[in-house]
Structure formats: C-alpha cells, structure tokens
Image (spheres, rainbow, N blue to C red):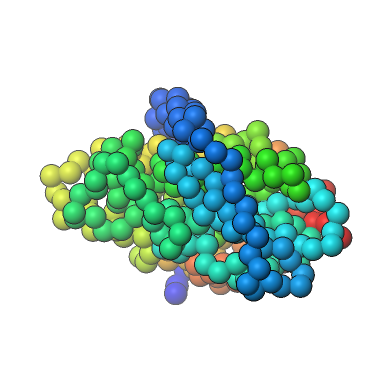
Amino acid sequence: MALTDMPLEELRRYRPEVPEPPDLDDFWAGTLKAARGAADAPAIYEPVTDPAPATVELFDVRFPGWGGQPVAAWLVMPRGVPRPLPVVVTYIGYGGGRGLSTEHLFWSAMGYAQLVVDTRGQGHDTPDPDPVPFPQLTYGFMTRGIEHRDHYFYRRAMTDCVRAVDAVREHPDIDPERVIVSGISQGGGLALATAGLARDTVAAALIDVPFLCHYRRSAEIASEGPYPELVRYLGRHRRVDPAVVFDVLNHFDGLHFAARATAPALFSVGLMDPVCPPSTVFAAYNRWAGERSDITVWEFGDHAGGWASQPVEQVRWLAERGLSGAR
C-alpha cells in the first residue's frame, strides 16, 4: 500500500471547513432524550461461569439502547482489586459484534473494567429492528436508511453507544468519573461520537484509525472498506441527489462531534491506510475541542494502525493523566 494522501506536515495543518447542520444539537438532544425516555428497565448483568477464568469476572449484559431496545455487551472486571474501577467502554469495527467474552482480557490485565458493546445488526446478539424498512438496493450498513437522517443506521448505533455509557456509570463497582471510550475503525468513530454526545460523562477517549469522519472526502479517496459503498450507491442511483445524501451524513460526521468533545483524547493514524484515509482522521483530530489531545502516527501503518503496540501506548497515556487501572 503506497502513501497516497497528504504529506504528514500538511496533515497536521488540515482542518477543512465542513459546515454543520443548523439543527445538529437539537437533533441529537431529541434523539437521546427519546432513547432515555423509552428505557423501562435498568441494565441486566448475568454472571458468565462457563468458562470462568481465574483472573476476571465476566458478565453477559443487556442494557436499553435506541428505542429502549436491548443491546448486548460483555462486562469484564479483574478479580481481587479495589473497587470502584475505571472502565474502558469499547466499540467494535465495521461488520463485527462483541464476539466471545474471553477475547477481551487486555484491559482487565491492566486493572480496568471493560464494557464491550455489541453493534446492532452487525453482531449475533443485537438485532436492528428499524420500524421503517430500508430499500432493497442497499450496499451495506453505510447506506442503510441513508435517505433520511431519522432512519439512518448510525442514528441508532450512535444512540446505543451513548446509552452504554449511561448504563455502565450506574454499576456499583464502576467509578462514574473514570469512563473511557475506545474503539478501532468503526469503533473509533463511535467512540468519537460518544465523546462528543456524552461529553459530561466521558473522562478520556482512545480513538484509533476512526471511520465515520469527513464523509465527502472519504467517499472520494478511500479505495477499500465501507466508504466505497457510498460511491456504488450514488453511482447506480443517479436520480438520487448526492447533496441530499451528504446532508444526511453531515448529522453523523465525526468532525462535528470532535468539536463538541471536552475530554482528553489519544488518536492513532496509519499513513498508508486505504480504508480511513489519514486526512479524514486528521480532519477530526485537528478539530478536537478537549483539554488536550495527542495522536500516534504510524508512518508505515495501514488500517491496522499500530497493531498490538497501540494499546501499550494507551495504557501509558492514561497513566500520565491520572487514569491508571487498579492494582
């Protein structure tokens, strides 16, 4: 994979003007108020005893998300450490779900609780029963419901992510002042959105090679991954006005969520990423409004970014900000 985006010195200055929808704050305030009002029960935590690792406690979770609908998650907590714990809320990459509980042991080994949030419609445990059917000619989650902001897939998915933070903050063994959101690719974009939408309750954000940022440029230059779904959709539906589609997407753009965030953030970017081009990552990073923000640049990284090296950077970064795990 060749370096096909801007040179690094230009990326560090790249801050495009993408006008916000005038009703963006009202749209999201109404969306989240409706979701919270639809919740008729608290989150449920069922202990997982098969398997039962010696070092962690595992819980199968259901919490009320969009429309009060149950969303699945895993809660993983280290055994034998003082409570309440800081928690890393992790969102998942495109097309994936929460997986198996034992796949998520890194953060507990570092002394953190971890809530691993299933993605509606993409995992096995959280369906996406949108009341308005989406068109037959849909090319993936990227274009599901794209004709109207009210029915766009990511309205529901992002609402679930904020509601995950709401839920885990109420757990008696979790410190509600030390909630950290995290994710890679789609998960990074969802973590970014949550940090902007739930800015009063997020203590830090770990945002790796984020998707869902700077949609127009992403559609124009990404050569792999979900963004080309937009190209195929608009290329084949030539009666659809691209301006209408990108207006819908503008209500879900990470650039606008970054401008609303208040927590510190650690981003990462791969300069040879064909899925989430570096300029789209820097466009969000350079608009981050949090107290402090940093970015780890993987010069020869593709969409995997820093691979297993990035979590090590994150642990160090969190410790520097007084957000160490329990020991």
> Compared to 26, does 4 lie above or below?
below
| Front one among 135 and 197 | 135
| Front one among 292 and 161 | 161
> Compared to 158, does 259 lie above or below?
above
Residue 58 occupies quadrant: bottom right
Residue at 32 percent across and 45 percent down: it is 130
- Image quarter of the C terminus: bottom right
- Image quarter of the N terminus: bottom left
Residue 274 occupies quadrant: bottom left
Considering every residue shown, the one lying at the far left of the view is 239
In screen coordinates, is 272 left or right of 297?
Answer: left
> Compared to 258, does 235 lie above or below?
below
Residue 223 occupies quadrant: bottom left
In screen coordinates, is 115 left or right of 250?
Answer: right
Q: Is residue 49 visible?
A: yes
Residue at 55 percent across and 69 percent down: it is 100
Q: Is residue 254 visible?
A: no
Q: How many marks?
A: 0
Tell me residue 272's x, y (percent). 49, 68
Residue at 59 percent across and 58 percent down: it is 60
In screen coordinates, is 110 left or right of 68?
Answer: right
Residue at 13 percent across and 44 percent down: it is 239
Tell me residue 282's x, y (percent). 54, 51
Tell me residue 171's x, y (percent). 69, 45
| Front one among 219 and 29 | 29
Tell me residue 140's x, y (percent). 31, 58
